[in-house]
């Protein structure tokens, strides 16, 4: 893995920080690389917007912040508006399909992938695990961390009683990602590339 | 025939063993009431048969703050106003100790006022003895939080016009379980109250109205120490259980003394242990004997 | 030295932020008491301690303010436990009173300051390294303390243990000078097994009760042994100038003897206490001095400079106080200059200048806080000094 800068953002209650923390844990503890996570604090971190930055690297991380991200996971429209412009050219954008409308993104060669993570989580019986669905999806799309390492980090981060549910959520997200990868990234050339349901 | 010379040693003062005699003479002025309160304190220790190895005394800054330096106990002379939070830490770290806070009105109620009300609110098991000489004596007799109205002080040369705290009322409202007041005239009663307080668990408070002949009485033409004793005798009125809102002090009015409050309320440590045990069950490991490995 | 009490040691690899890691460090070091008052960005330390305390035989109390928190821990220390408190700028200002009291009474204890931007309320959620002079000079009078600067969550853990050990060894307050970035940054933190963690126990005296002197120095540490309340030593502890017995003795002679020892016990042992991390200093034209989070950002700048062919070394101050004069003094005549990078408008740079004593250039790269440096800013200074 080369130095990779990530931003994960959404709104409070979506499990944004846990999602970032699981990825960091997988990269640094399970796979023995290096990961540094920072998060936005202050009144703006209560309720409303929520954002985490994550730097993954094969060598110790020096600079802790992310200015331009190689990969972003955005789970709310507000997060999209605030951060999407800071994706590197050629970078990857992952969005919550039902909550983010991807439009007006004028960065060259950005690959966009979308997943209805909230809906999938609801189908599994608990909306709360949408972040774990998203983590699985991220794992499949990014291929930065092995499927098993990331899964272990998920299970290490949740209470034993919820292991089964979270394992299922992770697998669902990962499978959705594999399928999506085969069909390719969304083409941003279209006017309204992402199917908006509801 | 010559008579053998017999040198008789003066009988030892019964309180002597409680004092750091190598630190005498003390700094207090002639006629000061603080020494009288220390005398009562040692009497109370003797009569209550307190284990002196298990009693600590904590003082703040000021004339009364020097008490910690003269008693032969584990003694802590802390910073101005902070005797109570220091004592809180000491008590929680070594629950087997009886912790006495011995300080003045300025130290406890002005700069240390916030700590005092919070310790009373928590009902930390501390025995607070407040020598109230109605002024900041160590620094030369300035207005304090307990200085009555219309009194001349070094910083109120035309008389005070800001109202004083009624100490027992404040402390009761904040949550103390034992509140009493005496003057330095009432030595027997004071020693007895101190004994009662040693036995009581929770935040206890005794106010001792005490003369500062050098700065307070002199400036206000209230005579010398002996005149002050006569004054105390004259104007004091024993009224156990008096409502504390009625016991405020004035320059020359009556001084209500007695035991005002003696009630039951679980102390901080008891509440903490019971609550954590209920919440955590077997996972709870109470802090017991201090370890320092 | 002894080893950590296994109770409370969470051996293993964790993904923790610096605040949480510092709390685990304190627990491993044997801290069984903390008093605190919430203040961003340090609150997580006591939040974690309040959660952990009842399960490890420890006590946490939330006090009414930082004045109270900073002296409650001193009361607890004299009650026989190891204790610490945690704060940030505004709270640290209130604690100055008890830094002086802890120094004067030689009470071993640890303060953790997670630095944020100031003065006053300043930037509650954003970083600075601007309490570096306050920690050394903020309480009145002459004194010496020890201050450590972690640059990662792992070091927040390691150096908090170190801080407790040094505080017991020298009977002095020791400060863990974190910054908001390190405090809130999450990384892998490895907690060793208890028997692998070295702990300096409190040096309780075994001397005779009638002749023991609480302030009589012992050994080359010039540090007296301890006694605690309840042991029968009838100690007297005062913030007044005192003699070896602890009795107030306010004369110039005793002041000279006692206060001088408070200072020399640290200054004379500075070379033993100081820890620096030096990298490629030999043969360097420019040496970058930094500490805390800034050391990591500076490292990126150093790598950029080296890629341009410049000969750059680094000195990281793990111990900021006592300042490692000897390290800077030895390097100064051999280099073109130092670049000092820190998140303030010029604090530790004064110490570098003092140690350099005109032997080479000293350039400062600082700003008023709120974020870390841009590596390019440090690179520019390196290039200028190398010219």
Image: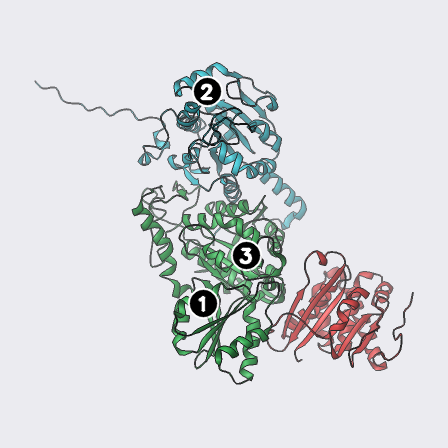
Hue of chain C?
A: green
Q: Which residue is mark 2?
A: B186
- Mark 1 in CB contact with mark 3 (< 8 angstroms): no
Horizontal side of C296 relative to C231 (left or right) equals: right
Q: Which residue is mark 1?
A: C275
Chain at tag 3: C
Q: What residue is rendered at 59% in x and 20% in y?
A: B242
Q: Is residue C200 visible?
A: no
Q: Is residue C359 visible?
A: yes
In front of the other: label 2 or label 3?
Answer: 3
Point out residue B127 in the picture as x, y percentages from the top left corner.
51, 33
Residue A166 found in image quarter = bottom right
Q: Nearer the viewer, residue C53 or A64?
A: A64
Q: What residue is rendered at 61% in x and 59% in y?
A: C20
The quadrant of the image that shows the N terminus of chain C is bottom left
Q: Are marks 1 and 3 on the same chain?
A: yes
Hue of chain B?
A: cyan
Extreme residue in the front direction: B158
In front of the other: label 1 or label 3?
Answer: 3
Spatial CA span between label 1 and label 3: 19 Å
Point out residue C222 in the picture as x, y percentages from the top left corner.
35, 56
Q: Is residue C77 above or below residue C135?
A: above
- Label 3: how many residues lie within 10 Å, few (<14), some (14-19) or many (20+)? many
Q: Nearer the viewer, residue B42 or C185?
A: C185
Q: Nearer the viewer, residue B190 or A72?
A: A72
Chain at tag 1: C
Extreme residue in the top direction: B234
Point out residue C139 in the picture as x, y percentages from the top left corner.
46, 51
Q: Nearer the viewer, residue A153 or B128?
A: B128
Spatial CA span between label 1 and label 2: 62 Å
Residue C89 found in image quarter = bottom right
Q: Which residue is mark 3?
A: C113
């Amino acid at each position: 893995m080369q130095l990779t800068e990530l931003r994960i953002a959404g709104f409070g209650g979506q499990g944004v920080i846990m999602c970032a923390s699981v990825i960091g844990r997988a990269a640094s503890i399970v796979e023995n690389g290096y990961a540094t996570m920072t998060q936005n604090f202050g009144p703006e971190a209560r309720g409303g917007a929520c954002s985490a930055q994550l730097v993954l690297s094969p060598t110790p991380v020096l600079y802790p912040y992310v200015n331009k991200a190689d990969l972003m996971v955005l789970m709310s429209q507000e997060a999209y508006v605030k951060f999407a412009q800071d994706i590197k050219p050629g970078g990857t954008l992952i969005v919550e399909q039902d909550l983010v409308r991807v439009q007006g993104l004028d960065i060259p060669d950005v690959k966009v992938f979308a997943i209805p993570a909230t809906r999938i989580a609801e189908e599994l019986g608990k909306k709360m695990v949408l972040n774990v669905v998203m983590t699985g999806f991220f794992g499949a799309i990014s291929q930065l961390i092995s499927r098993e390492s990331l899964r272990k980090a998920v299970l290490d981060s949740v209470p034993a009683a919820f292991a089964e549910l979270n394992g299922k959520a992770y697998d669902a997200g990962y499978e959705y990602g594999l399928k999506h990868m085969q069909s390719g990234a969304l083409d941003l050339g279209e006017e309204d590339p992402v199917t908006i349901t509801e | 025939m010559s008579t053998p010379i017999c040198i008789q040693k003066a009988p030892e003062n019964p309180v002597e063993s409680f004092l750091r005699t190598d630190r005498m003479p003390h700094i207090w002025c002639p006629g000061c009431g603080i020494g009288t309160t220390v005398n009562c304190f040692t009497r109370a220790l003797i009569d209550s048969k307190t284990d002196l190895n298990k009693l600590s005394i904590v003082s703040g800054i000021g004339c009364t703050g020097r008490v910690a330096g003269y008693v032969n106990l584990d003694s802590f002379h802390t910073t101005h106003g902070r005797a109570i939070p220091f004592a809180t830490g000491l008590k929680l770290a070594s629950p087997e100790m009886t912790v006495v806070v011995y300080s003045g009105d300025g130290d406890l109620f002005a700069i240390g006022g916030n700590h005092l009300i919070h310790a009373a609110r928590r009902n930390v098991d501390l025995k607070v003895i407040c020598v109230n000489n109605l002024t900041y004596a160590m620094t030369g007799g300035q207005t304090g939080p307990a200085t009555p109205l219309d009194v001349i002080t070094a910083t109120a040369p035309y008389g005070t016009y800001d109202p004083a705290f009624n100490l027992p009322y404040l402390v009761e409202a904040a949550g103390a379980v034992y509140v009493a007041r005496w003057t330095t005239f009432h030595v027997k009663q004071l020693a007895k109250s101190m004994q009662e307080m040693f036995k009581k668990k929770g935040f206890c408070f005794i106010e001792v109205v005490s003369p500062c002949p050098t700065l307070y009485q002199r400036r206000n033409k209230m005579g010398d120490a002996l005149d002050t004793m006569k004054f105390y005798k004259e104007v004091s009125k024993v009224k156990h259980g008096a409502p504390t809102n009625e016991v405020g002090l004035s320059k020359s009015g009556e001084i209500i003394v007695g035991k005002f409050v003696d009630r039951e309320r679980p102390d901080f440590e008891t509440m903490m242990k019971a609550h954590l045990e209920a919440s955590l069950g077997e996972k709870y490991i109470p802090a017991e004997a201090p370890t320092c490995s | 030295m002894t080893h950590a009490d296994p109770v409370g040691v969470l051996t293993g690899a964790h993904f923790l932020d610096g605040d949480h890691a510092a709390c685990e460090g304190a627990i491993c070091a044997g801290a069984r008491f903390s008093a605190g008052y919430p203040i961003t960005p340090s609150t997580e330390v006591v939040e974690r301690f309040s959660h952990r305390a009842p399960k490890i035989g420890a006590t946490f109390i939330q006090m009414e303010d930082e004045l109270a928190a900073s002296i409650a821990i001193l009361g607890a220390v004299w009650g026989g436990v190891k204790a610490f408190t945690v704060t940030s700028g505004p709270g640290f200002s209130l604690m100055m009173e008890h830094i002086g009291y802890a120094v004067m009474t030689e009470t071993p204890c640890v303060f953790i300051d997670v630095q944020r931007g100031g003065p006053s309320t300043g930037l509650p959620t954003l970083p600075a390294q601007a309490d570096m002079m306050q920690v050394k000079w903020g309480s009145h009078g002459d004194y010496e303390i020890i201050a450590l600067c972690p640059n990662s969550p792992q070091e927040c853990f390691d150096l908090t243990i170190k801080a407790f050990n040094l505080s017991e060894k020298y009977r002095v307050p020791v400060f863990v000078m974190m910054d908001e970035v390190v405090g809130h940054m999450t990384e892998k933190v490895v907690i060793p097994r208890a028997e692998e963690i070295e702990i300096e126990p409190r040096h309780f005296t075994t001397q005779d009760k009638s002749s023991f002197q609480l302030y009589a120095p012992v050994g080359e540490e010039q540090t007296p042994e301890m006694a605690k309340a309840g042991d029968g030593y009838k100690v007297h502890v005062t913030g007044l100038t005192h003699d070896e017995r602890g009795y107030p003795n306010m004369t110039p002679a005793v002041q000279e003897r006692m206060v001088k020892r408070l200072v020399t016990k640290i200054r004379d042992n500075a070379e033993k206490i100081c820890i620096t991390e030096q990298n490629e200093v030999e043969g360097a034209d420019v040496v970058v001095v930094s500490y805390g989070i800034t050391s990591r950002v500076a490292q990126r700048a150093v790598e950029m400079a080296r890629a341009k062919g410049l000969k750059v070394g680094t000195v990281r101050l793990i111990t900021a106080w006592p300042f490692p004069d000897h390290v800077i003094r030895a390097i100064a005549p051999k280099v073109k200059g130092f670049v000092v990078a820190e998140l303030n408008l010029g604090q530790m740079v004064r110490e570098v200048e003092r140690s350099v004593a005109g032997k080479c250039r000293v350039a400062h790269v600082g700003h008023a806080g709120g974020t870390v440096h841009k590596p390019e800013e440090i690179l520019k200074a390196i290039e200028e000094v190398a010219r």
